[in-house]
Image (cartoon, helix red, strand yellow):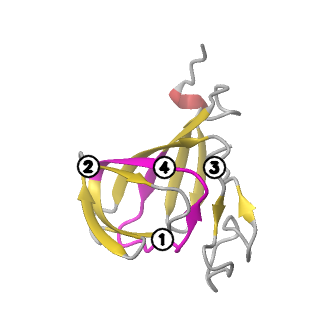
């Protein structure tokens, strides 16, 4: 058993918000990755996919999630199971943003579903057709 103290969590900041790793293979020796997302108000996330199922639970704020061509409005208390290999994009509430907890297999890889990077993608995003384990999942 491992205990990851709040002071020992790992924070990764992107232009869209902060991902705080709560547990992962390198953060407590977990087989799953658990992280908190603090999305900035009005953020528009990149179109992307994961090669594994992710479970998102919203704690505060709200979002619109485009998943495989469908739009879902979610807010505090809602949970979504995002299947593997389905394109997704998130839009945070323009005034409050959102706070979520996410769980995924520790080896989950993010990728660009069309194999092309968005022109304004941040340095931490997958490039072209590469598949990466995001820093907050490791």
Left or right position of 70 against 103: left
Element marked by disc 1: loop
In three-dimensional space, the C-alpha distance between marks 2 and 4, rounded to whole angstroms, equals 14 Å
Asked if residue 133 is positioned above or below residue 41 in the image, the reply reads above
Asked if residue 122 is positioned above or below residue 119 in the image, the reply reads above
Q: Tell me the mark number nearer the camera, choosing from 2 and 4.
A: 4
Left or right position of 67 against 123: left
Contact, CB < 8 Å: mark 3 with mark 4?
Answer: yes
- Report the residue marked by disc 2: 78
- Snapshot quadrant of residue 25: top right
Which tag, 3 or 4, sits closer to the chain's start? 4
- Snapshot quadrant of residue 118: bottom right
Residue 76, image x, y percentages = 24, 49
Residue under the image location 60 percent in, 13 percent down: 1
Number of numbered tags placed on the structure image: 4
> Which residue range is magenta in the image?
36-60
Residue 59, image x, y percentages = 30, 45
Foreground residue among 128 and 38: 128
Q: Which mark is residue 45?
A: 1
Q: Tell me the mark number nearer the camera, choosing from 3 and 2.
A: 3
């Amino acid at each position: 058993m491992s205990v990851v103290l709040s002071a020992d969590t790992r924070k990764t900041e992107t232009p869209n918000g902060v991902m705080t790793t709560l547990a992962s293979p390198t953060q407590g020796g977990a087989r799953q990755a658990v992280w908190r997302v603090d999305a900035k108000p009005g953020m528009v996330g990149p179109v992307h996919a994961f090669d594994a199922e992710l479970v998102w639970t919203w704690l505060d704020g709200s979002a619109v999630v485009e998943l495989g061509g469908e739009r879902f409005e979610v807010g505090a208390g809602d949970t979504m199971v995002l299947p593997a290999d389905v394109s997704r994009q998130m839009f945070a509430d323009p005034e409050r943003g959102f706070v979520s907890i996410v769980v995924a297999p520790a080896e989950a890889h993010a990728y660009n579903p069309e194999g092309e990077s968005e022109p304004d993608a941040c340095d931490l995003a997958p490039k072209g057709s590469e598949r990466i384990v995001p820093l907050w999942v490791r």
